[in-house]
Amino acid sequence: MRLAIERVPPFAQQLITNLSLRFESLLRDMESVSLLTAVQRVAAYLLRQPWVANQAKLPFYKRTIASKLGLQPETFSRSLQQLAADGLISVRGARVVFHDVARLQALLA
């Protein structure tokens, strides 16, 4: 790999870019775990997912997402239920429908 870094500048640039993005993601995760409530962490995660119209698809199993957010799976599920009870989202399997994005974003302010 060292040889490729030295001899192929575009490879080196892409490697640095990818490492930087990963580092930023880890910092954001650490900040989230230490500063946000469980519901806020779930809301922030949902808002970061790619969505079309008013829907997003959860890219991993809920247990995996919970772990990434520093939550127990039960806490993750309760947080989704709380957001749904508040009328902000609805969850159908791996699909999340956003009903009030502005209020969802306001949770993070």
Image (cartoon, rainbow, N blue to C red):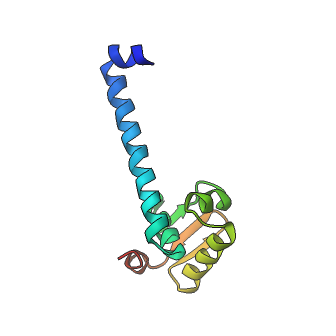
At 62% from the left and 70% from the top, the residue drawn is: 76
At 37% from the left and 20% from the top, the residue drawn is: 5
Residue sitting at the far front: 34
Q: Nearer the viewer, residue 77 or 84?
A: 77
At 56% from the left and 68% from the top, the residue drawn is: 96
Residue 92 sits in quarter: bottom right
Residue 43's spot in the image, x, y percent?
48, 71
Residue sitting at the far bottom: 86
Q: On the rendered image, what quadrant is the N terminus found in? A: top left
Side (left or right) of 53 relative to 38: left
Residue 91's spot in the image, x, y percent?
61, 72
Residue 67 sits in quarter: bottom right
Number of labels in the image equals 0
Q: Nearer the viewer, residue 17 or 81?
A: 17
Side (left or right) of 84 relative to 53: right
Residue 109's spot in the image, x, y percent?
35, 77
Residue 10's spot in the image, x, y percent?
32, 24
Side (left or right) of 2 relative to 10: right
Q: Is residue 56 above or below residue 17?
A: below
Q: Nearer the viewer, residue 6 or 97?
A: 6
At 53% from the left and 86% from the top, the residue drawn is: 86
Side (left or right) of 106 relative to 83: left
